[in-house]
Amino acid sequence: MDSLKQMAEAVIAGDVEQCVSLARQAIQDNLDPVEVIQQGFSNGMDTVGRKFESGEMFLPEMMQAAEAMNAGVAVLKPAIESSGSGSLQEFGKVVLATIQGDMHDIGKNIVKLLLATSGFEITDLGKDVKVAAIIDRAEEVQASVIGVSALMTTTMGYMPDLIQELQELGIKAEFPVMVGGAPVTEEWAKEIGADGYAKDAVGAVRVAKGLAQK
Ligand code: B12
């Protein structure tokens, strides 16, 4: 079994030690840490989500899988940070949050890591963040971009609220909004009037750079 497949399996099994040791091995083997996260660990998470949905896995196992994934990502983090161009170029400020009612932050944290290492200054508001709090902070730090994550069909409904609120306040043009998270799609982003969408963290960096330069 190749190592990316082993990583996915280790996440599915919720095996923290195995995730850590595979991540360490990946660094020794000079594998691209971002690819390792996206093609390895995240693939495992997709399977976990499917198994949860079909009733083959339950909440404690999903939590264990999340812990294992986080442990693997933590090992890779320094390698991603040291490969970044953060100190070379400053692209702007991103206010980042997982939307109200939503506790999922693994993906948001990966987006944060890549944005930070690509030269953005990040204000991370965490998870379960109310629309008003996102707007307040964006105004306070004079954000170049607002990035919002949602992992549930039930919580992605707060994203249009954010955009509407910005419109009502007359500050929509000042704060471009990019959205993401597993249930969010390009079409939906367009429909709600978001300025950008990316399906993964690498794409998020590309989109944020475009929006920050506007
Ligand atoms: C791990 C997980 C959990 C963990 C979360 C731990 C944590 N700290 O985040 C725990 C166990 C706590 C959890 C809890 C719950 N979960 Co859950 N969870 C998942 C799971 C398996 C994986 C999510 C994940 O981390 N993926 C890995 C990361 C790397 O991927 P990602 O988040 O998609 O992020 C990438 C991209 O989307 C993108 N991206 C992400 N954010 C952003 C933001 C921007 C701006 C951009 C541009 C891009 C971007 O870049 C990221 C990196 O490439 C998903 C299934 C799935 N496939 O999504 C279910 C899933 C999201 N959970 C689900 C459910 C139902 C729940 C619970 C309600 C379960 C319960 N009965 O309590 C609770 C919800 C609690 C709450 N109020 O939020 C459902 C949601 C269904 C729905 N309504 O849509 C899912 C889809 C599982 C399923 N198929 O049923 N969960």
Image (cartoon, rainbow, N blue to C red):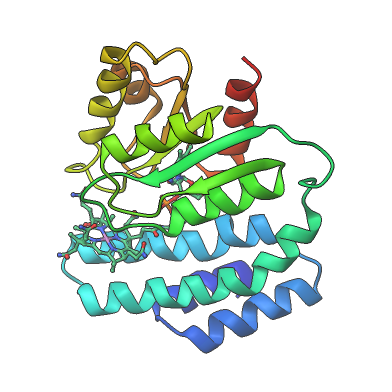
In the image, taking residue 174 as reference, residue 75 lies left or right, namely: right
Query: Could you tell me which residue is drawn at 49 percent across and 71 percent down?
Result: 70
Which quadrant does the N terminus fall into? bottom right
* Residue 143 shows in the view: yes
Query: Could you tell me which residue is drawn at 42 percent across and 76 percent down?
Result: 67
Ligand 1 shows up in the quarter that is bottom left
Q: Residue 71 in the image: x percent, y percent? A: 52, 77
Query: Could you tell me which residue is drawn at 63 percent across and 79 percent down?
Result: 22
Q: Residue furthest front?
A: 140
Q: Residue 58 in the image: x percent, y percent? A: 20, 74
Q: How many marks?
A: 0
Q: Residue 33 in the image: x percent, y percent? A: 69, 61
- Is residue 95 placed above or below 190 in the rendered structure? below
Q: Residue 14 in the image: x percent, y percent? A: 40, 80
In the image, taking residue 191 as reference, residue 153 lies left or right, namely: left
Which quadrant does the C terminus fall into? top right
> Residue 169 sits in which quadrant?
top left
Query: Could you tell me which residue is drawn at 58 percent across and 30 percent down?
Result: 208
